[in-house]
Amino acid sequence: MNMNDKQMLYILQHMIENPYMGVLYIDTSCQVILVNQTFADILEVNRESLIGKHVNEVIPRSRLPYTILNGETNLCELCCVNHKEMVSMRVPIYNDGEIVGAMAKTLFLDMGAAQIMVQHMTSLLDSTPVQKHGKYYGKYTLNDIVGNSQNIVRIKSLCARVANNISNVLIIGESGTGKELFAHAIHNSGYRRNKPFVRINCACIPENLLESELFGYEEGSFTGARKGGKIGKIELAYGGTIFLDEIGELPLMMQAKLLSFLQEREFERIGGNELIQSDVRVIAATNTNLAEAIAQGNFREDLYYRLNVVSILLPPLKNRLEDIEILVNHFIGKLNQKLGTVIEGVDEESFSLLKSYDWPGNIRELENLIERAINLASLDGQKIIQAQYFPTLQPGGFLNRPLKLSLNQAIEDLEYHMIRETLKKNNYNKAATARSLDIHPSVLYRKLKKYEVI
Ligand SMILES: Nc1ncnc2c1ncn2[C@@H]1O[C@H](COP(=O)(O)OP(=O)(O)OP(=O)(O)O)[C@@H](O)[C@H]1O
Ligand SMILES: [Mg+2]
């Protein structure tokens, strides 16, 4: 059925003029452009008198200006309007990737109704299996992924669209671009959200243990096998998602086994003779160039096509510098809570410094630098982070050590330097870096964490 503009307008008007929810819309100068009668009733003022006023004149403590300022979104927040407690949401409105306004909408006009909903949800969640999965659950949602750049907005909407199907997903991106975050978010956006989310890092597990980690084994199937056997990660993820991280490092022998599993959706435990059916969604991630690995004979082309049904290419941070500001503010808020600090922001000079850096460690590196800067600025009693608190971004800047080093500090500096340089030479591929440095990938991971390199 086709609708003409008039019918459409009529429906929209009636959707907005709804006695069960208050709606208020502001433009980029925070002036009220549209408000429905319900909202005016909450405020106990004449509706027309609200138009053109600054939102904080109407609702003194409204955070809607932050939605205009940096896209801050809150899908469920407690607020107090005209001495009335209620639950509302606020979201930015975009046009061509730019914020053009912001909308506030009430979800519950009174706390009684909200409480009934909370009770209902609590009993529902209590009966869902999510709590039984221990550490195996999706930790992030699409709301945790910050960024307004066109690419990120487009990728988030793609994730929401594919969340409910079973197609395999391949997430490609440099280290620290958020591959893990997106994998969790896809899982949590679909009907599998209450089932396990199980991650396996293909680069960190020794080749001879990978098969049993993935598929499990029966009792007595090899020397050292655990009594009673062991369930593999694929079985553990039943009904949910298995996240195959660093898939480019999967040894060829295991690639063949994984391919056969993906084709048949069934497998056998090592030493077992029973075919186990599996209902699991596969999300794989890589920061290596798989096309190159295929050309060199290190990655099976057929497996690549099997995995790459939905392909998500995460841009490096240097290609979306417009997100720096919103990311910095997001991390300051998050880290203030974690560290108990009261930093309010960064100054203009810092922003230009942050925007002129090439971010090899991407968002993880940004988060680490902000954490260090918050600590340094707080020690000096500052509330605004100045450029001097980003010593590693200053020309010639590094760990900012005092000149007189202990032997241990000198060794650490050398190790830090070598790891950074080798990473750079290997295009931030951690497995190749570990090989170049002649250390096991898990040792490299530990050191990367220690030095907060990426
Ligand atoms: N868009 C984003 N918004 C907020 N935080 C982000 C975003 N992207 C990444 N992060 C943060 O950056 C850090 C790195 O993200 P993540 O672990 O998902 O990266 P990755 O691509 O898996 O990196 P690696 O290849 O090194 O494993 C995490 O702390 C994550 O919370
Ligand atoms: Mg990762």
Image (cartoon, grey):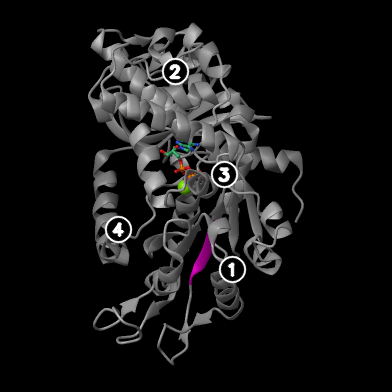
Q: Residues within 10 Å of mark 2 (few under 14, many from 20)?
A: few
Residue 360 in the image: state x and y as whole percent. Answer: 55, 31
Give the residue pinned by disc 2.
Answer: 392
Label 1: which secondary element: helix
Instruction: Say if 19 sits above or below 116 in the image.
Output: above
Spatial CA distance of label 2 from label 4 is 35 Å
Residue range of the region highlighted in magenta in the rendering: 280-284
First in sequence: mark 2 vs mark 1:
1
The disc placed on residue 135 is: 4
Q: Dominant secondary structure of the magenta stretch?
A: strand
Label 4: which secondary element: loop
First in sequence: mark 1 vs mark 4:
4
First in sequence: mark 2 vs mark 3:
3
Residue 374 in the image: state x and y as whole percent. Answer: 32, 18
Q: Which amino acid does label 3 sit on?
A: Lys
Taking depth in this image into account, of 70 and 408 the one nearest to the observer is 408
The answer to whether 364 appears left or right of 110 in the picture is right
